[in-house]
Image (cartoon, grey):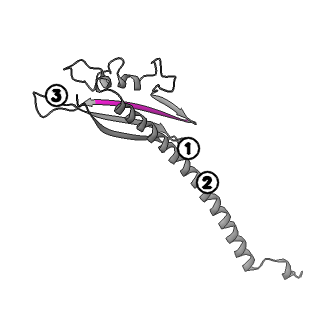
Amino acid sequence: MEKYNLRQAFTLIEILVAATMLSVLFGMTYLLSNTLFGVKKIRSYETAIMLANEAVEAVRAARSSDLLRLPPGKKADPKAKAEKDSLVADFNSDQDEYDDTVCGFKPEIKVGNVLYKRTIEIIDMESDSKSLESPVKTVRILVEWKDGEDATPLTYEIITAHCDLR
């Protein structure tokens, strides 16, 4: 029968120390990868917020008559297409002459490898009085994109009001 040399084997303490070190190493790697994934996801949300905020600022800066370009007394139909040369038509189209410049608005913007689709909708609010037209409009800005990692569809929406104090 052969005799084993007990000095060449691992002790229980050595195995526990090695297992603990491997657990810490794998845990740190997992934590780092999840942190980087979270940062990427937060960056996509920040971009969507910035794009929606840009649309809100454009609505604030535009004349009330340029938002929908409706003749006086005509009500906006939410299902109808926006009038030509209105702010809504400009935002929801990439066929305008200034769209390729810094001043242009594109409905689809690619940032990195993420494609953001931005839509703006402006709806006239109904007035409580039948004799007076309501100067208040509801502005809805929707930014949609798909997450780069798992292609999960995500949305960011701002709903605000705009008042025409002519």
Mark 3: few/some/many CA within 10 Å (<14, 14-19, 20+): some
Q: Residue at x 36, y 31 (%)?
A: 61
How far apart marks 1 and 2 lie (CA) works out to 13 Å
- Amino acid identity at mark 2: Ser
Task: Report, in whole angstroms, how far the alpha carbon at label 2 lies from the one at label 3.
Answer: 56 Å
Image marks 1 and 2: residues in contact by CB distance under 8 Å: no
Decide: marks 3, 1 in contact (CB < 8 A)? Answer: no
The residue located at (29%, 27%) in the rendering is 64
* Figure quadrant of residue 107: top left
Inspect the magenta stretch and tell me whether residue 116 lies in it. yes
User: Mark 3 falls on what kind of element?
Assistant: loop
Distance from Cα at disc 3 to Cα at disc 1: 48 Å
Q: Quadrant of residue 33?
A: bottom right
Q: Nearer the viewer, mark 3 or mark 1?
A: 3
Residues rendered magenta in the picture: 114-122
* Percent of width and height locating residue 70: 26, 20
Helix, strand or loop for the magenta stretch, by majority: strand
User: Residue sitting at 21 percent across and 19 percent down?
Assistant: 72
46 left or right of 80 in image: right
Residue tagged 1: 149
Number of numbered discs overlaid on the protein picture? 3
